[in-house]
Each structure stands twice: as structure tokens, then as C-alpha cells.
Image (cartoon, rainbow, N blue to C red):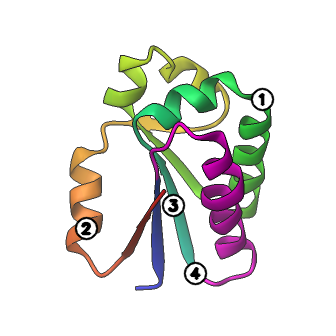
Amino acid sequence: MDKLIVIWSSADREVALKMAFMYTLNAKAQDWWKEVTLIIWGPSAKLLAQDDELQAEIKKMKNAGVKIMACKSCSDSYQVSENLNRVGVQVQYMGLPLTQYLKSDNKVLTF
């Protein structure tokens, strides 16, 4: 299957803008991968909830066809689940879905 899963867990803003978001957007926009999913995990959830520029980038990815998800357990722990939902992020428990991605033929990339 031609599917890429990108896990963004870093609280480093520069990693988000210059690596995770840049590659994820282009992977979909340039048709490098048929399906692209970004999973927001851990401290990246808190960073995204507080940063308007990062939220704008998430909207660009979403408009390009990237599926955007966040770990509910993580976002709840930072009390930002509602904020992420407002930005259009699908917030759900991700332990089982991530396990299924890892056990499949999908490619998983982490930042």
C-alpha cells in the first residue's frame, strides 16, 4: 500500500515547520504518496494548540488531502483537545491505530 504515516511528537517549532510539516505537505501535494496521515503525539499537541502559524500550516495540509489526527490521551493531558478539534484535527485514542499502522505495510516516519 502506498500510505505514509507521519508522527509529529516534537515540541520544537522549527522541527515542525522545517521538517515534519514541509515533508508531509509535499508528500501529498506532489503525489509522492497516495495517502498521507499526520499524527500529533505528545508535546506537539500543546505546541500546536498555542501557535497560530502552525495551525495555518495544519489547515494547508488538510486542504491538500492530508489526514490530520491527534492522540486524545496526549491532548487531554495538556488540556488542548478542544483547541485541536477547532482547528480541524481528528482527536482520538491512537494506541491501537498506531499499532495497526506499524504492523502493516504502511511506512511510518517520526519527527
Which residue is labeled 1 in the image? 52
Label ID, residue 37: 3
Local crowd size for mark 4, using a 10 Å CA cut-off: few (<14), some (14–19), many (≥20): some
Which residue is labeled 2 in the image? 102
Q: Considering only order in the chain, which callout, 1 or 2, is on the residue closer to the N terminus?
A: 1
The residue drawn where x is 51% and y is 60% is: 37
Q: Considering only order in the chain, which callout, 4 or 1, is on the residue closer to the N terminus?
A: 4
Label ID, residue 33: 4
Q: Give the Cα distance between marks 3 and 4.
A: 10 Å
Local crowd size for mark 3, using a 10 Å CA cut-off: few (<14), some (14–19), many (≥20): many
Of helix, strand and loop, which mostly describes the magenta segment? Answer: helix
For label 3, the SS is strand
Residue numbers of the magenta segment: 8-33
Q: Give the Cα distance between marks 1 and 4.
A: 27 Å
Question: Closer to the observer: label 1 or label 4?
Answer: 1
Label ID, residue 23: none
Q: Give the Cα distance between marks 2 and 1.
A: 31 Å
In the displayed structure image, the side of residue 64 where residue 39 appears, left or right: left
Q: Give the Cα distance between marks 3 and 2.
A: 13 Å
- Report the amino acid beneath label 1: Asp
Contact, mark 1 vs mark 4 (Cβ under 8 Å): no
Q: Considering only order in the chain, which callout, 1 or 3, is on the residue closer to the N terminus?
A: 3
Q: Give the Cα distance between marks 3 and 1.
A: 21 Å
Q: Position of residue 9 (x, y in %)?
A: 45, 45
Q: Position of residue 48 (x, y in %)?
A: 62, 32
Q: Considering only order in the chain, which callout, 2 or 4, is on the residue closer to the N terminus?
A: 4
Local crowd size for mark 1, using a 10 Å CA cut-off: few (<14), some (14–19), many (≥20): few
Indicate the quadrant where residue 94 lies. top left
In the displayed structure image, the side of residue 60 where residue 97 appears, left or right: left
For label 4, the SS is loop
The residue drawn where x is 31% and y is 28% is: 73
- Report the amino acid beneath label 2: Leu
